[in-house]
Amino acid sequence: MVNRRDIGKIGLAAGFAATATRPAWAESAADVAVKAAQQYKGQTITIVWEAGLQSLDPTHFSGPKWKELTGMDVKVIEVATADMFTKIMQDYKSGAGAYDALNVIPAWMPDLAQAGALEVLDPYVEKYGYAAELQTIAPTYRDNQMKVDGKIYGFPDDGDVFLMYYRRDLFEDAAVQKAFKDKTGKDLAVPKTWAEFDVVGAGLTDVLKDKGIYGAAFFRQPPYTMFMFEERFRNEGGKFFDAASMKATINSDIGVRVFTDMRNENKFMPPGVEQWGFVENLAAFLQGQTAMTISWPPYGRWAEGYGTDQEALNWVPKTTIAGKVGYALPPGGHPELAAGFALSVASTSKNKDAAYLFIQWLNSEAISLERVKLPFTLRDPFRAAHYTDPGYLALWPNAKNYLAALKLASETGLLDLSLLQTDKYEEVLRQAISKLWAGDDPKAILDTAAGEWDAITQKIGVDKQKAVYTSWASKSGAYPKL
């Protein structure tokens, strides 16, 4: 799997944030973890971390700080996103115990938990008094990305969620508003439904194209569009499977309509948008060439110029729209919690308590607040305190609106589809999207994809997969309440 993290030329960053101090009497979860970990002074724990920008967190900030506080070394094993699941599973099956702590994409949890690769964390949470601070994780992450069959296997640690970013200056421009009204007969407003999005996107392209501005653009490479389809399909009322038979239903009328509309929308987007990835779409928005886009939280920060002076972010295009950006939920109002990460402990670790204490400290309210403000590591807000922190609110003039949109997304977001062998179902979706951009018939594409999903389910075992899907579908973030 490729996603927004597999990007950029990574350099060493300067100006790392200093750790916030707390009164000595305040026994926070971070304090508890540090005190308990001091008995392991001189030991080393290994943690699997996504290669690239994300890894600057443990290599340059949290790892060195943990050693300073506890005397423990942290060895960071950098692994490409596409290889992380396989590497974790291989280490478990071999019994080598090469990893102590893990970063796990939440959609993988049922697979890893059922295999036995993840340590159940409930006893550690109780032992080290972490239950109360876990409750301050934003509800959609806490309720959807922490447990499998009622047991804790990971701490939600990255507020990955899609937001809509739009050119506030264009939407508020009286001349643009008039031209749009003359063209469409409607008042210009940020779209709240996909039907409205189509009108606004096409209308703005008609009005602004002569100035080199298109109404909208998205990343369209299949690994990204897969998440956008999962989100939009559910917002429009779609279900992935028939709950009784476990027959795939992505080829329903809703699925076909979503596929058809997605392709039609490319007509008012820049030429060649079907090939755009994370960076191409980012560049177009930051350079003022598009009026609307949807992406992960870093777009919002980089559009304002926050942190882009860091060497590690020297690949990010220079923004021309700082101070002109608005933030909103994507059409439908239930954004995808696309990918994300949770912190777990490997069941084969020989240093389980030490590994657990490190991830409790990392995930704690005090330390996570510092980590999500690091400009270059792509960790996004995921706790209630992150959205109201005075320091974060002051990072740029409009940060309060950015954080307000992220908070709303954290309450309404949709969990990625999570099954046994999720990666196989996702690969079918990615191939379907490639066929869509190639011009194949949307109904035929989705009929084929549904058949392939059914074959995968049959191979895994219908009853076995049904139990996992039923558990997933019962979560608050599985389907929106329409």
Image: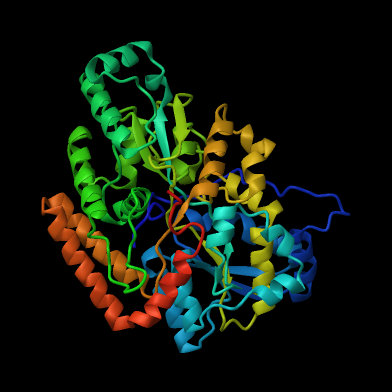
**Residue drawn at point x = 19 percent, y = 60 percent:** 446
Question: In what quadrant of the picture does the N terminus appear?
Answer: bottom left
The colour mode here is rainbow
Q: Residue at x 74, y 72 (%)?
A: 126
Residue 307 drawn at (x, y percent): 52, 38
Q: 65 and 392: which one is in front?
A: 392
Residue located farthest toward the right when viewing the structure as drawn: 25
State whether residue 138 is above or below residue 156: above
Q: Please, which residue is most extreme toward the front here?
A: 244
Q: Is residue 274 visible?
A: yes
Q: Nearer the viewer, residue 4 or 119?
A: 119
Q: Residue at x 67, y 64 (%)?
A: 360
Residue 31 in percent (x, y) is at 78, 60
Q: How many marks?
A: 0
| Residue 153 quadrant | bottom right
Q: Nearer the viewer, residue 426 or 237?
A: 237
User: Quick check: 125 above or below 277?
Assistant: below
Q: Position of residue 194 (x, y in %)?
A: 32, 39
What's the residue at 51%, 86% (across, down)?
A: 96
- Residue 382 image offset from top left, x and y in percent: 58, 51
Q: Quick check: 453 left or right of 116?
A: left
Give the quarter of the image for residue 252: bottom left
Question: Residue 234, relative to residue 130: is it above or below?
Answer: above
> What is the quadrant of residue 150 in the picture?
bottom right
The answer to whether residue 308 is visible is: no
Specify whether 271 is left or right of 480. Answer: left
